[in-house]
Amino acid sequence: MEYILIIISAIFVNNILLSQFMGICPFLGVSNKLSTAVGMSGAVCFVITLATLVTYLFQYYVLVPLHIEFMQTIAFILIIAALVQMVEIVLKKVSPSLYQALGIFLPLITTNCAVLGVALMVVTNEFSYGGEPHMLNLVESIVFAFATSLGFGLAMILFAGLREQIALNKVPKPFQGIPIALVTASILAMAFMGFSGLV
Amino acid sequence: MGKFQLITKGLIKENPTFVLLLGMCPTLATTTSAINGMSMGLATLFVLVLSNMAISATAPYIPDKVRIPAYIVIIAAFVTILQFIMQAFTPDIYKTLGLFIPLIVVNCIVLGRAEAFANKNSVVDSACDGIGIGIGFTFALTLLGLVREILGAGSAFGFKFISGDGILVFVLAPGAFMALAYLIVLFKKVTAKKGE
């Protein structure tokens, strides 16, 4: 039951893009076309889940026993950067077709704040799903990270679909480009507000 | 370019938020009020100036291939220092801004200035550039925070001037996107007129 609550909350109620504002750069940057949005979402999904697993283990098996939790920020960003590099190398060897599809998005992900954001969230915040507020355990963290990245993908793909439609319409000159995209995002965020109170 | 121009260009001509459209995540997330926006802007300014100076000083010794990871480590070190300072002196603001203080590490403005300016200019020029861009960012965040606070809560910098609630949606997520969209449009209009 708790896992279902985590999933619904992470995808809809606390959507990482539309209510937490993490990962806005790719949200605005690569949402012009539906196909690139799908590629980016896939790559982000993969990296967020993997990065959360590694940083979670690093936090509780290295940083906490050594009492150097203050090194969190530096350690996590290095882990993420190294991980992205590694995923790139492994994908290139193992599955060239997947590498072709995700390839160009992978280097961009290091500076996507959603990745570092989720990694930090699971080790610093307390979550309450119905019961007592508590720190997430390993399995819950992975479920949370995966669901969050699904939420990222959902918002991203919806938004890309909307922007493809907007591109066909006449937009007042000052609004062209980013401003109209922001207005669209605002309305999309309003729609997502309808989910608040669900969990 | 003179030192004075380096400092002032970030305010209007190369405003990181309204013109370059960088660092959108903290811009949208932390501007629920003018004070919060300003604190976030100043925190970024602090990291930006110090990291610009450090990167400009060390750039000749960093091999080209590993420069991006090296810059990120330098930036992360300054962010950690900032976290300590804020925890000690402004714990309330540190709590409100929460996750977005460590997330300064992945703010594209900071890494962007390192790559575009600091690694090929002198330490003093890089510091001026950091101050300029930082002030521009602080100005943008304060303005956005002020607009959202006035519309959403009917107050400015914490002083309430209407009784009751404002248009609450402006404090929430959709209002952030909407307010930023209209501010960018206004900014474009104003600067376009000036250019004519």
Image (tube, coloured by chain):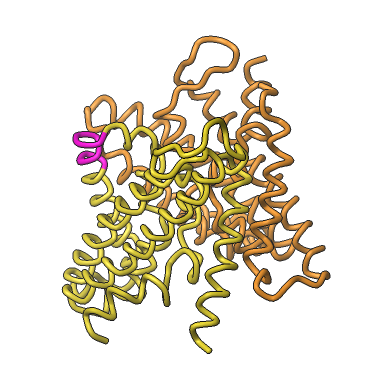
Q: Residue at x 34, y 67 (%)?
A: B133
Q: Position of residue B74 (x, y in %)?
A: 25, 57
- Write down which chain is painted orange: A
Identify whether A88 is placed above or below A57: below
Q: Main secondary structure of the magenta part?
A: helix
- Number of marks in picture: 0
The residue lying toward the viewer, choosing from B143 and B159, is B159
Identified at 47% across, 49% down, the residue is A113
> What residue lies at 43% left-to-right and 48% top-to-bottom?
A80
The x, y position of residue B163, in whole percent, is 52, 32
**Residue nearest the observer in this picture, B135 or A67:** B135
Q: Magenta segment, which residues?
A: B83-90
Q: Position of residue A29 (x, y in %)?
A: 60, 63
Q: Is residue A114 visible?
A: no
Residue extending farthest top: A131
Indicate the quadrant containing the N terminus of chain B: top left, top right, bottom left or bottom right.
Answer: bottom left
Q: Residue furthest bottom?
A: B196
**Chain letter, yellow:** B
Could one spot residue B186 in this view of the protein?
A: yes
Left or right of A149, for residue A170: right
Residue found at x 20% / y 36%:
B89
Q: Quadrant of residue B56?
A: bottom left
Quarter where residue A65 is shown: top left
Residue B178's place in the image compared with A18, above or below, is below
Q: Nearer the viewer, residue B56 or A39?
A: B56
x and y, in percent, of residue B170 in the image: 58, 44
- Residue A83 as seen in the image, left or right of residue A1: left
Q: Is residue A66 above or below residue A167?
A: above
* Magenta-colored stretch includes residue A66: no
